[in-house]
Image: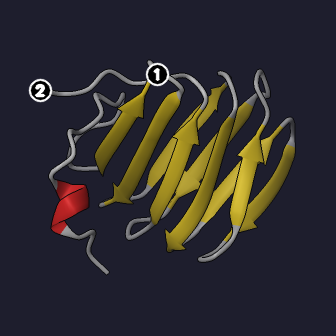
């Protein structure tokens, strides 16, 4: 499935990953940041923490390790990462996920 034009027209996030690894589309508000992710290549995001994050898998899988506990999420499944929890993520190419970040400035927008 491809994201429809109404999603693809949204600005992209300035992510710490190369553009050939992930594509993003962002909807921002004063209350948080909603990001539509599409992983074009395998990605391994090292351990880090930030404010709360909720996500759901549309395609592919998300292998999420939160505070040392690893769980793999598949399409239709959702996950929640509490504020301050140390976590890392493995995402295979083809994965699509929607994530909501509690921080409205989690990622700057590309203009």
Graded by Cα atoms within 10 Å as few (under 14), some (14 to 19) or many (20 or more), the crowding at tag 2 reads few
In the figure, is residue 98 to the left or right of 40? right
Question: Which residue occupies the foreground of this view, 51 or 87?
Answer: 51
Q: Is residue 8 left or right of residue 104?
A: left
List x then y, in percent, for residue 85: 79, 28
Disc 1 or disc 2, which is closer to the eye? 1
Residue sitting at x 33%, y 41%: 26
x, y percent for residue 99: 53, 48
Task: Tell me the quarter of the picture where residue 77 sits.
Answer: bottom right
Residue drawn at x 25%, y 58% as measured from the top left: 7
Residue occupied by mark 1: 30
Mark 1 is surrounded, within 10 Å at the Cα level, by few (under 14), some (14 to 19) or many (20 or more) other residues, namely few
Q: Identify which residue is drawn at 21% across, 61% down.
A: 6
Query: Which of the pair 44/54 is nearer the observer?
Result: 54
Q: Is residue 93 above or below residue 28?
A: below
**Quadrant of the image for the N terminus?**
bottom left
Residue extending farthest bottom:
1
The residue identified by callout 2 is: 111
Q: Is mark 2 on a helix, strand or loop?
A: loop
Residue 107: numbered disc: none
Describe residue 12's horizontal placement relative to residue 49 as left or right: left
Quadrant containing the C terminus is top left
Q: Distance between the residues labelled 1 and 2?
A: 18 Å
Percent position of residue 20, x then y: 21, 49
Query: Which of disc 2 and disc 1 is earlier in sequence?
Result: 1
Q: Is residue 43 above or below residue 96?
A: above
Instruction: Name the residue: 16% across, 65% down.
Output: 5
Q: Where is residue 80 in the image (x, y as percent from the top left)?
A: 75, 47
Check disc 1 and report its element: helix, strand or loop: loop
Q: Is residue 64 left or right of residue 92?
A: right
């Amino acid at each position: 499935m491809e994201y429809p034009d109404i999603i693809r027209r949204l600005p992209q996030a300035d992510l710490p990953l190369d553009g050939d690894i992930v594509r993003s589309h962002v909807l921002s508000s004063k209350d948080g940041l909603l990001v539509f992710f599409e992983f074009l290549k395998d990605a391994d995001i090292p351990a880090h923490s930030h404010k709360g994050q909720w996500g759901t898998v549309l395609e592919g899988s998300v292998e999420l390790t939160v505070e040392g506990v690893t769980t793999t999420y598949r399409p239709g499944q959702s996950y929640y990462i509490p504020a301050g929890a140390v976590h890392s993520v493995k995402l295979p190419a083809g994965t699509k996920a929607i994530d909501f970040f509690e921080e409205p400035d989690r990622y700057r927008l590309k203009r």
